[in-house]
Image (cartoon, grey):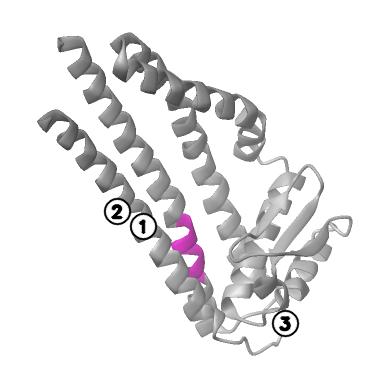
Amino acid sequence: MNNYLNYDFYIWIALIITVISQVLIKTTYHKYQKREITKKLTGYDIARKILDKHKLSDILVIETPGTLTDHYDPTKKVIKLSTEIYHGMTISSSAVAAHECGHAIQDKESYKPMRIRAKIVPTVNLFTKIGYLSIIIGAIFDARLIEIGIVLILSMLAFQLITLPVEFNASKRALKELEKLNILNSNEKKGARKVLIAAALTYVASVISTLIQIFRYILIANSRRRH
């Protein structure tokens, strides 16, 4: 019983890290979503300016429902901006729209980590599902199945680690484009940087949480082997 309480401790640690990162991005996002930029450009306007500058006029910028649902779809060559970002003339709208454009520019330039991430997605999804199933069955019957599950789940960790440079690089490109196009003033740039840093920290938190989970599964496997 005590062992399971110890294992649950690691679940709580991972959960706390995830919650803190989510609270940070949401509070930072909402804070700067209330601050309009001097140039009065919407997220759509900014995205269009950056894309056209890089001769990416073939990439569509469309509105998508939800909050913080913004993403670039490399298969369809579409940037999807949430309603608040698409229509917003704020610091957050500027930062998020520019970040998604950063991914489009990465795609154009065949940024290697992005290419690798795209190729391994199907394999990672399959390995992760099988890995968790192996751990569940192994916790009941055989420690060796837990070990197999851990190896498979390492693919998810690899995916998350590859995601880090992709996201950090997109944010770096975003700030560079906003500066080159003179879209934000100095104070607005500081706010945009804070929004992008907060967003990046959610990916770092995911890596830490996965590491904690894997460590927990290793402890469970060792306990099962002793028994």
- In the picture, measured across the screen, residue 62 lies left or right of residue 36, that is right
From the viewer's perspective, is the residue at label 1 or at label 3 nearer? 1
Disc 2 or 3, which lies upstream in sequence? 2
142 up-or-down from 204: above or below = above
Residue 145 location, quadrant: top left
Q: Toward which corner of the image does residue 138 lie, by quadrant? A: top left
Give the image location of residue 226, x and y in percent: 15, 11
Label 3: few (<14), some (14–19) or many (≥20) C-alpha neighbours in 10 Å? some
Q: Residue at x 64, y 65 (%)?
A: 66
Tell me the mark number nearer the camera, choosing from 2 and 3.
2
Quadrant location, the C terminus: top left
Dots 1 and 2: beta carbons under 8 Å? yes
Name which of mark 1 and mark 3 comes first in the sequence.
1
Q: Give residue 147's position: percent from left, percent from top.
A: 34, 15
Q: Which residues are magenta?
A: 193-200
- Could you tell me which secondary element the residue under label 2 belongs to? helix
Task: Identify which amino acid the numbered label 1 is placed on.
Answer: Val
The residue sitting at 69% across, 87% down in the picture is: 39
Quadrant in which residue 10 is drawn: top left
Q: Give the residue pinned by disc 2.
A: 16
Q: Nearer the viewer, residue 147 or 98?
A: 147
Instruction: Tell me if residue 176 can be seen.
Output: no
The amino acid at mark 3 is Leu
Contact between labelled residues 3 and 1, with CB atoms less than 8 Å apart:
no
Identify residue for label 3. 41
Q: Is residue 59 left or right of residue 31?
A: right
**Quarter of the image containing the N terminus?**
top left
**How far apart, in angstroms, are the residues tagged by discs 1 and 3?**
32 Å
Q: Residues within 10 Å of mark 1 (few under 14, many from 20)?
A: few
